[in-house]
Image (cartoon, grey):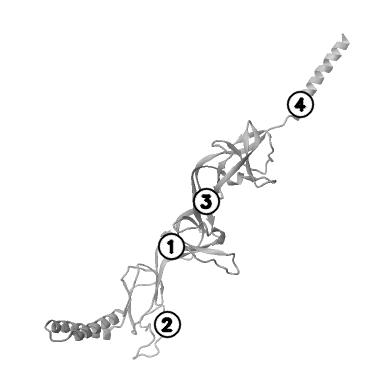
Amino acid sequence: MRQKKILLVSLVTAIVLAIVLWAASREKPVTVKIVPVKTGDVDQIVSSTSSGSVEPAETVNLMSEYPGAVTHIYYDKGDRVQKGDVIIAMDNALAKVDLDRTTEAYARARQLFASHAISKSALDTAMYAYRAAYVRYDQSFIKAPISGLITQMNVHLGEFPLGSNPLLPGMTSAFQQYGLLVQIIDDSSYHIKAPFDEVDSGVIRTGQPAHVSFDAFPDHLYDGKVIEVSPSVSTALDLNRTIEIKISLPHMDNIRMGMSADVEIIVDVAKSALYIPTYAIQEASSSNSRFVWIVKDHKAQQAGIKTGISNWDNTVVTSGLKQGMDIILPSDQYTLYEGMKVLTHD
């Protein structure tokens, strides 16, 4: 009887030990982060190789062709002007006398020609004299050829823009070295010129949308459009071979001329496509094939895929996955292998 008890105790002990060893050797599932395969629009983008600069849509530099002293300055640097506004007026007394004289002479010539008292050539002579006097008088006013913002004003009252006056020889000013009196920019819209790698030249076209970001506003993207693609490739020694792309951007009060800007151009869009996070895709070491890890029956499993267009965030999957399948995201917290038991969380 005692032997039976000892045998029974030994048997129970063996069973318990076997259960403990089985439980100890049983694989514990690893918690992994997953995302579902989604459907939506995915952009293919190319990025500028370095920052571009903000430029005005148009810049005009105004100079003078009239040898007179500045008598009036109606605007200053930082002022806004409308097309046709007089910015600067110069001493035009003599020009006004000549204009009045030729205006009267031309009026008389037209009357005489109507009564056949003078020839057509005499009428034309009077007309040309009037037109020349009008042009000369009009040159005494510096007018805005565009609407915009005055960014340079390089003249003061009493100065002679041409630096040559028969009554006051030698009257010059510093700006005469360059001849620039006034600079006006049209800031109703902006241009950004940015370099792109020459390998992208085959996919960039005018009219394509672009995203523009500024260091001053890192959390905001501005919408632009490609308006010009350089026909030549830059071969500057200090740069890789690049092409210059011009982007248009609408006016915004917080943007300033000369700001640096990074540009991304949307060269293609996949509509209503299956897509997954780009960084979830892995390359097979023994081939050029691509795969992701998926969850199947609570285990990790490789799934070979084929891909379409992509960007930094998302990549289109053309085969190998279905909408709603759970993709395991890479992490330095675990190493995946085929058949590994997993627990999932979003």
Q: Residues within 10 Å of mark 1 (few under 14, many from 20)?
A: many
Q: Secondary structure at mark 3?
A: strand
Q: Position of residue 315 (x, y in %)?
A: 56, 46
**What type is the residue that disc 1 sits on?**
Tyr
Cα–Cα gap, marks 4 and 3: 52 Å
Q: Earlier in the sequence, mark 4 or mark 2?
A: 4
Residue where numbered disc 2 is placed:
176
Q: Residues within 10 Å of mark 3 (few under 14, many from 20)?
A: some
Tell me if I can see residue 18 in this picture: yes
State whether residue 287 is above or below residue 197: above
Residue where numbered disc 3 is placed:
44
Q: Secondary structure at mark 4?
A: helix
Front one among 88 and 246: 246
Q: Earlier in the sequence, mark 1 or mark 4?
A: 4
How many badges with numbers are in the image? 4
Q: Earlier in the sequence, mark 1 or mark 2?
A: 2
Q: Residue placed farthest to the left in the image?
A: 115
